[in-house]
Image (spheres, grey):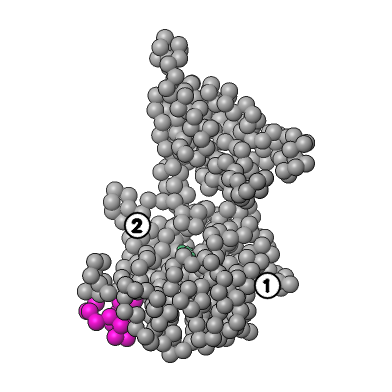
Amino acid sequence: MWDEILASIGPEPAQISLEEYRARQNRLLNQLRPDDLLIIPNPAHSTRSNDVEYPYRTSSDMIYLCGWTDLDSTMVAQQVNGAWEVTLFVQPKDVLSEIWEGRRLGKEGALENFAIDRAESKDDLEIVLIDMINSSKRILVKSAVDTTIDEIVNNCITAQSRDRQKLGIGPISVEDPSGRISELRLRKSAAEIDLMRYSAVVASHAHIEAMKNTKPGVGEWQLEGIIEGFFKYGKTSGIAYPCIIGSGDNATILHYTVNDDICEDGEILLIDAGCEYKGYASDITRSWPVNGKFSTSQAEIYQIVLDSQLAAIDACRIGNPYDLPHEIARGVLAQGLIDLGVISQNLEEALDPTDGELRFWYMHNTGHWIGLDVHDVGVYRPDNEPRLLEEGMVLTVEPGLYFGAWRPDVNCPEKYANIGIRIEDDILVTKDGPDVLSKNCPKTIEELEGIIGE
Ligand code: GLY
Ligand code: MN
Ligand code: MN
């Protein structure tokens, strides 16, 4: 049904190569000391109700370092005879479990297909890991991901073993490696960018399908169904976060996910939806009139947000502070509202974080890192200075204006009552300037009016 669209997108990109996983591991392991032990735990499955579990999503660090996505697994790296050895603990082959729960690669499959040196059964985790911990000085592990691992590490650290007393050996400290891994994940490789671009292209077409099916009387949930259906049809793993499908005053609720309202004639519809492909997220927002034609008031607000977004995207350049797009977007939004008479202050006053009137109508940041997590890892202000953008970083640019007439805290201008506009794209920083990964998703007033209800 959507085959033609998918054909126009082209083939799925190449997967991350074993060499690239090795290179990622080495970039991390080369920062460590010979007697360190690195442990990458995975979260446990969580139960939804009796015998029913939530879909499993492994830890992003695990995906990043070896691409393994099954549950009940742990990655460990330790030096053996002067060289790092990467071990993956996995579910062992087991016919009965596989009949009920699905196929397992087992130890052999893991060793054959993944960038690891050794595979062990998760059933042997405790006994093998205790040995590894006791022959290390520092343990690098993120706590509170897998309580079993936390317990094993804590017991080893606190154990007053004979060896520790006699020979002074055993682990003495625990450190969280997340900061080091985040620094690596912040800069995307060419292969990662291909996956992110695919994720963004599929999400763009999902938005277009929702635009085509928008008309007065359609249910928010029906558009959600089209979007999520397209994500699956496009062979992604589905949503990267719950879809926000807000019509009318729902468009002024930033994280509205109820999606159970009817889209009415004359309303604006705001859709914030992105998919996850091979672990990589896209995050796109578009806002358009339900009846296919922007009213004068809607167009006025829409154009200000679009102008602010385009100006902010243009600031996504190597060497610029990460928050420059935010400052630029705020400036354009505030000036636009001053020109419309919504804000009575001057520009400087309007932008004041405590007293400026812009804060009534624009209350969030203009973007965030995006990658394996939709709100991806990476410190924004290392040493409390704004991070400067580098080639390969990917961030969203998503300014908005929200006139919730239902809000008791503000006097919403009647002319703009219940107009909520956000426009969000995913931007790759390149040597040649900003590259909009989600550029297939239309956003000018003319483009949108030409598609809605088609
Ligand atoms: N979809 C969540 C966000 O835009 O940050
Ligand atoms: Mn976002
Ligand atoms: Mn979003």
**50 in relation to 242, above or below:** above
| Residue of label 1 | 5
**173 in relation to 323, above or below:** above
Between 302 and 9, the one nearer to me in the picture: 302
Q: Quadrant of residue 161?
A: top left
| Residue of label 2 | 388
Q: In the displayed image of the protein, which residue is found farthest to the top?
A: 166
The structure residue drawn at horizontal position 32% and vertical position 49%, both measured from the top left corner, is 382
How many circles with numbers are drawn on the protein? 2
Q: In what element is the residue under mark 2?
A: loop
Percent across and percent down for residue 147 are 51, 35
Q: Which mark is residue 137?
A: none
Crowdedness of circle 1 by 10 Å Cα count: few (<14), some, many (20+)?
A: few
- Label 1 is placed on what type of residue? Ile
Between 442 and 320, the one nearer to me in the picture: 442
Magenta-drawn segment: 333-348
Q: In what element is the residue under mark 1?
A: helix
Percent across and percent down for residue 172 are 39, 24
Percent across and percent down for residue 249 are 46, 76
The structure residue drawn at horizontal position 39% and vertical position 28%, both measured from the top left corner, is 173
Answer whether residue 314 is visible to the viewer in this image.
no
User: Counting residues from the N terminus, which is met first, the one under dot 1 or under dot 2?
Assistant: 1
